[in-house]
Image: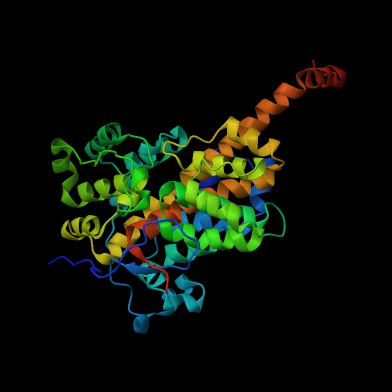
């Protein structure tokens, strides 16, 4: 007897990219919060994540969740040097926009706005898509993220040259590569094991 | 199957200790270490659950092949081959050839983004290979193709197909992580290779004569 998915017939999925705060509903049963073992807590990394159905579902395989979360945090939060946080979030947003992950794009466009103070420019990326002409530096980061997101990967000499011309050094380029590559991981999970819910009114 | 490669991304991207890319990667030590831990959690798990080693490498060889990054494709194909199932390896190769398209494509929920819907194929394993792969692995490849090329078409129905083919809820989480992790690993490798290649070509553009003069001056020729 196979297990069954969860369905949410009353949910009205958001139909546009937004910087608003969305919710998310799982398509598979999350791990029961009251049965979490030490290994599961280690997998969740932050205890607060036990409140999230997304992380509780991923906690079913705690070891990969732990490694994934620590990879994520260093790529985005380790800002002792390299690319400013705003532009790492821009790479995450552009990747999510290109793959079509409305939920991921909502979270990381909010971060991009918070750190860059350029909410209108971030919104143009959401509204107009990855072709939006913003400025030389942001365009180069968006185009590089998109090229790296294509399958097969289209990121090559031209993207590296454009990033350098926009003033990025090699460490900053590695941050763009890591940020966009990581969201190819995150988008696929977020899109395929549940669905977003509309912003709270 | 145990690996003697201490860092798979370095191995696949051709990064040697002490080089400039090695030092750049070291600036994000947690990301570097945990990308490797992710690989180990998926391919050498301490608690493998019900997803077999063959299933893990068969899906990985398929996903890597679909991305057409030669170093990564060869690595996972060799790993699968090393497990000693030549017919399975041949079946995966044939399915990579059948499934290789371009992404991302897919549909949005009906609304203003519908104009951006991009049509693309829904891949199915060939009738011949369905038998040699078995229903469980065939379902996994079909789901992997969806995640690689058109993840925005994902649905509860796609997950139900996996559950009906014998994947448990926890197995589905592991499978989803495996395909999604590879989508990351392959892009880091491709990105770092591009950066290394651009650096080599740039320095070659700038100062071939200086290098040559330097060599002459050193008395090395």
The C terminus of chain B, quarter of image: top right
| Rendered location of residue A24, percent (x, y) | 38, 68
Q: Tell me where residue A200 sits by quadrant.
A: bottom left
Horizontal relation, residue A9 to residue B61: left or right:
left
Horizontal relation, residue A89 to residue A1: left or right:
right
Give the residue drawn at x 29%, y 39%: B119
- Residue at the farthest right position: B217
Residue B150 to residue A46: above or below: above
- Picture colour scheme: rainbow
Give the residue drawn at x 19%, y 44%: B133
Residue B137 to residue A35: above or below: above
| Rendered location of residue B101, percent (x, y) | 33, 34
| Rendered location of residue B83, percent (x, y) | 31, 44
Q: Tell me where residue B52 sits by quadrant.
A: bottom left
In-front residue for pair B40/B150: B150
| Rendered location of residue A29, percent (x, y) | 28, 71
Horizontal relation, residue B155 to residue A107: left or right:
left
Q: From where the camera sits, is residue B25 visible? A: yes
In-front residue for pair A149/B44: A149
Q: Tell me where residue A133 sits by quadrant.
A: top right
């Amino acid at each position: 007897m196979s297990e069954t998915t969860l369905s949410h017939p009353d949910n009205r999925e958001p139909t546009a990219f937004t910087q608003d705060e969305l919710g998310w509903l799982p398509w598979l049963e999350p791990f029961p919060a009251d049965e979490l073992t030490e290994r599961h807590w280690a997998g969740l990394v932050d205890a607060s994540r036990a409140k999230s159905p997304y992380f509780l579902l991923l906690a079913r395989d705690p070891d990969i969740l732990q490694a994934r979360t620590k990879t994520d945090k260093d790529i985005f939060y380790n800002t002792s040097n390299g690319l400013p946080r705003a532009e790492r979030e821009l790479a995450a947003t552009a990747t999510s926009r290109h793959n079509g992950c409305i939920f991921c794009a909502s979270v990381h466009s909010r971060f991009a706005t918070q750190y860059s103070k350029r909410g209108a420019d971030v919104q143009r990326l959401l509204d107009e898509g990855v072709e939006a002409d913003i400025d030389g530096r942001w365009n180069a980061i968006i185009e590089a993220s998109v090229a790296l997101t294509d399958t097969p990967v289209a990121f090559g000499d031209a993207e590296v040259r454009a990033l350098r011309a926009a003033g990025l050094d090699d460490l900053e380029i590695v941050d763009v590569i890591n940020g966009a590559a990581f969201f190819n991981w995150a988008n696929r999970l977020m899109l395929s094991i549940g669905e977003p819910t509309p912003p709270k009114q | 199957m145990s690996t003697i490669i201490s860092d798979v991304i370095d191995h696949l991207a051709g990064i040697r200790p002490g080089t400039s890319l090695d030092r750049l990667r070291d600036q994000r030590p947690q990301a570097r270490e945990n990308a490797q831990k992710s690989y180990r959690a998926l391919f050498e798990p301490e608690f493998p659950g019900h997803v077999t080693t063959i299933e893990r490498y068969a899906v990985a060889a398929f996903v890597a092949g679909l991305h057409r990054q030669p170093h990564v494709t060869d690595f996972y194909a060799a790993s699968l081959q090393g497990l000693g199932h030549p017919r399975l390896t041949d079946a995966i190769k044939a399915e990579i050839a059948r499934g290789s398209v371009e992404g991302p494509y897919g549909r949005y929920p009906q609304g203003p983004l519908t104009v951006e819907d991009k049509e693309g194929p829904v891949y199915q394993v060939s009738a011949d290979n369905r038998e040699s792969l078995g229903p469980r692995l065939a379902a996994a490849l079909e789901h992997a193709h969806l995640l690689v090329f058109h993840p925005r078409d994902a649905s509860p129905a796609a997950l139900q197909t996996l559950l009906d083919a014998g994947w448990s809820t926890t197995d589905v989480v592991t499978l989803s992580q495996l395909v999604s992790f590879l989508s990351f690993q392959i892009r880091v490798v491709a990105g770092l290779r591009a950066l290394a290649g651009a650096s080599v070509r740039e320095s070659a553009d700038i100062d071939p004569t200086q290098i040559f003069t330097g060599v002459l001056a050193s008395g090395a020729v």
